[in-house]
Structures are given as C-alpha cells and as structure tokens.
Image (cartoon, helix red, strand yellow):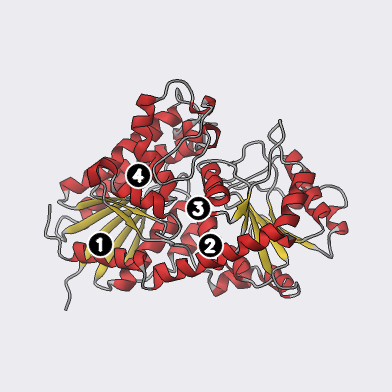
Amino acid sequence: MAKTTHIAIVSSPGFTHLVPITEFSKRLVKHRPNFHVTCMVPSLGPPPESSKVYLQTLPSNIQTILLPPINKQDLPQGVHPAILIQLTLTHSLPSIHEVLKSKFSEDPLTALVVDIFAFQALEFAKEFNALSYVYFPSSAMILSLLLHAPKMDEDVSGEYTDLTEPIKLPGCVPFMGVDLPDPVQNRSSELYKQFLQRAKALAAADGILINTFIEMESGAIRAMGEFGDGKIRLYPVGPITQKGSSNEADECDKCLRWLDNQPPCSVLYVSFGSGGTLSQHQINELAWGLELSCQRFLWVLRAPSNSSSSAYLEAAKEDPLQFLPSGFLERTKEKGLVVPSWAPQVWVLNHNSVGGFLTHCGWNSILESVQEGVPLITWPLFAEQKMNAVMLADGLKVALRPKLNKDGIIEKEEIAKVVKCLMDGEEGKGMRERMRSLKDSAANAVKDGYSTQTLLQLASHWDNFSGV
C-alpha cells in the first residue's frame, strides 16, 4: 500500500481565489489517491454560504479547515479589496501556524502550497521541513509582471501610467502603463508596497504553480523558464476551473430553459464575475447598447455602485432589476433575459445557443470561456483585468475591446458596434475559429498533454521527497 503523502494548502478569502486552488487539489488527489490535502480557508467575516456549500462537495482525502474569521471592524474601512485580502491573510497567520502544528507534529508534511496573497505563510515550510510553493491563479503574463516588478521599480522613475512607450515583458504582448493592475497605478500607495512584497516573496518558493497552459501563453511561460538563470521553477497546470454541478443547473433552470429556445450561437452572455459592478450611468449605456445591437442577450445584472469591485467581498441586497432604464425589459423581452446577481456560468457558456461572452476579464471567466470555445468582448474593471484584456484582444485575437469615452464610459453606440461585430460580423467569425482551436488545446492540456504531465512530474517529486 502506497504511503500517505501530506500536502497543506492555504487559500485566500473570496470565492474566486478559493475555487482554483481547491480545484487544483481535486485534480491532484484524482491522479494520486494516496495524497491527503489539508486545505486552510481564511475569511473576512463569516465564510459565505456559497463557499461552505462548495467545500462540502470535496472528496474525503481533502480536509477543509475554516480558519477563525477575521473581524471586519479590526481592519481599515473603505480601503481597496486587495488590501483587505492581504490583511486578512496576515491576521490569519497565527491560525495557519496552529493548524500546521496540530496536524503535522507527527505526520510529516511534504509540501505547503499557498495562494499568492498568502505568501507570508511560506516561511512555515522550513519549520516543518517541507517544500514550499505558490499557487498563482492568474495568467503567465501577470506572473511575468510580478517577477519583473522589482527591477521595473528600480529602472522606471515616476508613475508607470505616464509612460508614453509600451511596456514589453519577455514573451508577452506589449501593453501601456494605464493597463497595469490596480496595485501598480500609484507607486506611493500601500497597495503598491504590498504588490512589491508579493513579487519579492516569489523567489523564496521552491516552485510556482500557475493556472494556465503552454498553448495559450507559450511565449511568457518559456521566457520565465529562463528568468533568474532558470532558478524559478514554473509548473503550468491549467486550465483549472470549476465544472458546473447538476444542483447548480437546477437552481437556475430559468436561464437554461430560455437558452434552449434560442438559435445556435445567437446569444451574447453578459456577466462581470462574482464581484464586478457598474455605475448607474454605465448600466444605462449597456442596456441601451444591447437594445441598439438587436442581438439576443443573457445579462447577469448587479445593483449599481461607483466602486467597480464593490461586490467582491460583500454583495448588495437591493433588487438590481429596478435600476434598468424605464421600459427596457418590456422592449427587449423577445430578444433578451436579465437575471439578478447570478447565473450558472459554466452551464451557460457550454450551451450551444451562446455565441459570445461580454466579460470583466477575470481569469476564471476567461479560462471557462476558452474551455467552451466562446469568443469575448472585454470589459475590464479592476485588478489585473486590463492586462488580460490586452492579451485576449491584441495577443490571442479572440476578443474585441470596446473604446471608452473621455469620461471612462463605454457609450451605447460603441457597445452596439462591438456586439454586432462579434455576433454577426466577419471579424467575429475569425475569433470564433481561433477560440475553437484554443478550446481543443485546453482539452488536450488537461487530458494527457503538457499540463497533466507537469502535474504528474510534480506529484512524483512529492511522493519521493524525504524532507528538506
């Protein structure tokens, strides 16, 4: 009988960080049933019901430990969600250490795998004679930015947003300074300091697991293989996404029944992820733009907010449908369906009537769309989403990126134009073909291709590990 290999994993708060690292754990134990994973889940306030329900579906050799929630009142008020996430992890370090002590004082720990926001927990690996890894839930392009950030910080004076020339990371499509993630936009901010801390911590890990695949980001992955004289060990193991459950489909049967009655490839799915919100002005323009396009649509709508990430850690309680322009639902009832707050995204993207996806460009949503072969309209809101949009539109050429006006609003005419182009134009057809090719590559990567081979090599290394 094979010996039990113990792996500990630390997630970050927020469903979009919890799912990728947990789905990685599921894939790991599927290939190695002798592995036992202890997954520690920190949270800001009581864990959301969606997280608890999801964690109950895990196999028996993945044990979930919900860490004591951090009290919101103990943290600064009105700060960026990334600061709250980082502070939640910092305040959870004593609990993480306590779990490691109680679980692995006798059973040897082989590897500690932490989400990028939990980088401070890496130091515990040495104490338990274990290997240490960062699980990076975003793209290779964003990881490349992190790896190069300390050098960029030395070389560039002033704000990156003022740069007139594109930034060129090895193996990546060039992008402008204004497209950098939120934390990099203000170099005197606490957000930027935390970003640099995370960047510098990567060098201390024994490896970085990244949720992407070689066919999607070959240039960035290969270039990083040579970074720091090849000292960074990179493991592309994606695409790792959550597959829709039958329960999830039942809960939102209305969406799927409506899609059943639409022609193939005719519906644009519109969703801004689990946390993205629009202002009232922008909701109005999007509604009018969808109406003007005369295309079918399924729109997941949230109540408006002037903070684009306001729903990331806490959802609004109001009925979002009341914020639509007067008469919109009546005028579009033959063409569209608007659902409040949530839809079974994986099932929607998998439906044969869906022909396009207007997305905030969160990495989970991008990978889900790639796996279903659905081309995109990019509408980045926060975090690293602008860089993702550049990669999709300029690099992979599987997306259209609408233009903002001088006030940062995408107007109804521009929305109608890109929607018609994607759903009914020649350019959209080309994007659909390229996305289908990417879909085939993604399926191969996780079946028996490069990503699975990488995971199996890592698992063998852990199986044979006998202590630092």
Tag 4: amino acid: Ala
Mark toward the start of the polypeptide (4 vs 1): 4
Residue 269 visible from this viewpoint: no
Q: Secondary structure at mark 1?
A: helix
Marks 4/1: CA–CA distance: 21 Å
* Placement of 387 over or under 109, stated as above or below: above
Q: Residues within 10 Å of mark 3 (few under 14, many from 20)?
A: many
Q: What residue sits 74% from the left and 48% below the top?
A: 415
Q: Residues within 10 Å of mark 2 (few under 14, many from 20)?
A: many
Q: Secondary structure at mark 2?
A: helix
Q: Secondary structure at mark 3?
A: helix
2 vs 4, front mark: 2
Q: Which mark is residue 118?
A: 4
* Placement of 135 over or under 344, stated as above or below: above
Marks 2/4: CA–CA distance: 28 Å
Percent from the top left, x then y, of residue 121?
28, 44
Q: What residue sits 58% from the left and 52% below the top?
A: 273
Marks 2/1: CA–CA distance: 25 Å
Marks 3/2: CA–CA distance: 10 Å
Mark toward the start of the polypeptide (3 vs 1): 3
Q: Residues within 10 Å of mark 4 (few under 14, many from 20)?
A: many
Q: Which residue is mark 3?
A: 363
Percent from the top left, x then y, of residue 356?
66, 61
Percent from the top left, x then y, of residue 376?
62, 56
Q: Residues within 10 Å of mark 1 (few under 14, many from 20)?
A: some
Left-right relation of 468 to 198? left
* Placement of 442 over or under 327, stated as above or below: below
Residue 438 visible from this viewpoint: yes
Tag 3: amino acid: Trp
Left-right relation of 310 to 203? right
2 vs 1, front mark: 2
Left-right relation of 406 to 130? right
